[in-house]
Amino acid sequence: MKKVLMSLGLLLPLAPATFHESSIEAETPAYAKWSQIAIKETKARYPNVNIVDYFHIGSTSEDGVTKEQFKLWLKDGKREFGVFVTITYWSDTGTLKDIEFRETDR
C-alpha cells in the first residue's frame, strides 16, 4: 500500500518546517508596535467597552515627528461608536510624544 501511495504522490516524506527571522519580520508591519499601544491606551480610556475592530489608517512624517492613525470600533452594551486614535512619536528615536482620541458615530 505504501508503494502505491508513493507512486501516486500521496505519501510524501515529512520534513520539519523551517522559519527564517527575516520572513517573520517582513510580515510584521512597521506600525505593529503603535497599534498595540493604541489598543492598550483605548482599553485604559474606555475600560468597560469591547473593542470590536481596528483599522490602521496610515502614517505621516514631518519635521522629525511621525503620526500613526488608527480607527477602533467599540461596543458598550447597545452603543457602538468609533474612536480615532492618533499616536505621535519622534521619528529618530521612536519615543512616544502624544496620544489623541476623538470619538465618532461612524
Image: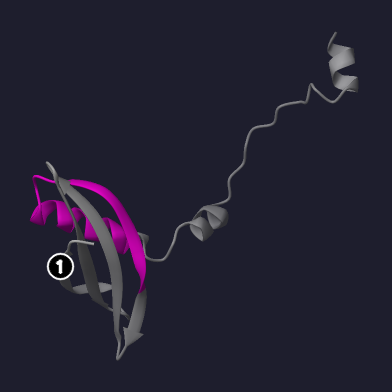
Q: Is residue 54 above or below residue 48?
A: below
Tell which residue pokes out farthest to the bottom in this image. Answer: 63
Residue 42 counted in the magenta span = yes
Residue 57, above or below 72: below
Q: Going 80% across and 22% down the picture, which residue do you hit?
A: 10
Where does the magenta region start and end? 33-58
Along the horizontal axis of the image, is 85 left or right of 33? left
Residue 17 occupies which quadrant of the picture?
A: top right
Image quadrant holding the C terminus, namely bottom left
Q: Where is mark 1, residue-wise?
A: 101
Q: Quadrant of residue 2?
A: top right
Q: Quadrant of residue 34?
A: bottom left
Q: Residue at x 24, y 54 (%)?
A: 73
The residue carrying pointer 1 sits among few (fewer than 14), some (14 to 19) or many (20 or more) residues within 10 Å by Cα, namely: some
Q: Does 82 sit above or below residue 17?
A: below
At x 62% / y 41%, what residue is drawn? 18
Question: Is 76 situated left or right of 57 in this image?
Answer: left
Tell me the residue at 85%/8% (across/down): 1
Q: Position of residue 47 (x, y in %)?
A: 9, 48
Residue 49 position within the rendered picture, expressed as x and y whole percent measured from the top left: 13, 46
Q: How many marks?
A: 1
Where residue 55 appears, as percent x and y from the top left, is 34, 60
Q: Does residue 22 appear to the left or right of 45 in the view shown?
A: right
Kind of residue sitting beneath label 1: Phe
Whether residue 37 is visible to the viewer of this picture, yes or no, is: no
Instruction: Give the secondary structure at mark 1.
Output: strand
Q: Is residue 63 magenta?
A: no
Nearer the observer, 101 or 74: 74
Provide residue 37's location: percent of width, then percent of height.
23, 59
